Amino acid sequence: MNYEGNIIRPPSEAHSIILQITVGCSHNKCTFCGAYKGVRFYIKDAASINDDIAFAARYCQNQKRVFLADGDALIIPTARLEEIFSSIRKNLPWVNRINLYGSTKNILRKTVGELKRLKELGLDRVYMGLESGHEPTLTNIKKGVNTEQMIQAAEMIRAAGIFLSVTVLLGIAGRAQSTLHASRTGRVLTKMKPNQIAALTLMVLKNTPLYNDIRTGCFHLPDQRMLLEELKILVKSISLERVQFQANHASNYLPITGRLAKDKKRILEIIEDGLNGRLHLKAEHQRAL
């Protein structure tokens, strides 16, 4: 496969065919993200994509899913996406799911009809980064969208019948806004009604503006206890009858997985056990992105 730069994919796509159709990120302004700093964003040409599909047809016959990298697949015009999806279906007939990252801006550029068409061609899951439901935090991290836009984009994905996985980021509001970040993120998630919620914990990279904010004292990282309290408030603030909840990413200090609302009491008990020292928390050197 012809990969360029850093290939970022969700943990659940570890066994998927990774087909890179864009390079970098068209937004590339989030203060916490160092994945594509210094990388010029562009859409890969049809010949390169077709070569990679041909490679997958020959060497990836045991993999049933395709993940479209990098972070901006939906920025591609729908007609061109339909060609890519159709080529995957034709040349990789054993593939039963096509998944991708979907930024709020790029989702809102589509219509529900266009999303439904991609669903018909195999689009199964969209991973969307909320990060925070706290408006000042979204402004501070330069996310480029507000919570109402996030909710609207989520409604469009659900209306198209596509599985929606939403990521939130513990610690991203710093110490001062930790509680508000957690509670308002839970409320926004309730309005978004995703199929899956993934809670990650902030890890600061040296090539990011956020790292400089920490060095200059403009941002103060929450400690382990504050992060667990944040997670507890987040879970308490989510009012959904059926959603898969995961806080088991490698960045988290206390791995948790379950379903809300069915496992809400158990999840809160696990967090309390972590807060009270009854459960081992992951050491700093064991964490990873």
Image (cartoon, rainbow, N blue to C red):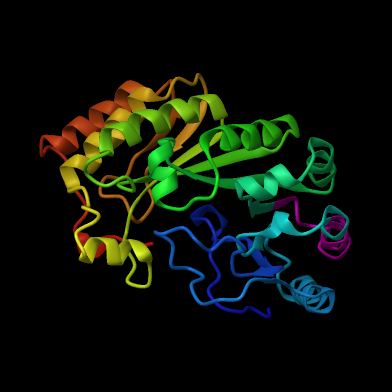
Is residue 103 depicted above or below 217 in this figure? above
Is residue 30 depicted above or below 156 in this figure? below
View extreme (left): residue: 277
Q: For the N terminus, which image quadrant? A: bottom right
Residues 277 and 153: in front is 153
Q: For the C terminus, which image quadrant? A: bottom left
In percent of width and height, residue 147 lies at 52, 35
Q: Can residue 288 be seen in this view?
A: no
In percent of width and height, residue 19 lies at 69, 67
- The number of discs equals 0
Instruction: State the residue at coordinates (25%, 62%).
Output: 286
Is residue 71 depicted above or below 6 in this figure? above
Instruction: State the residue at coordinates (35%, 56%).
Output: 250
Query: What residue span does the magenta drawing correspond to?
Result: 82-98
In percent of width and height, residue 53 lies at 78, 71
Instruction: State the residue at coordinates (52%, 41%).
Output: 166
Q: Can residue 188 be seen in this view?
A: yes
Q: In which quarter of the image is residue 191?
A: top right
Residues 135 and 120: in front is 135
Query: Does 223 appear in magenta?
Result: no
Position of 196 compared to 178: left or right? right
In percent of width and height, residue 281 lies at 19, 48
Q: Quadrant of residue 239?
A: top left
Position of 153 compared to 287: left or right? right
Query: Does 87 appear in magenta?
Result: yes
Residues 78 and 91: in front is 78
Is residue 47 depicted above or below 126 in this figure? below
Instruction: State the residue at coordinates (25%, 54%).
Output: 219
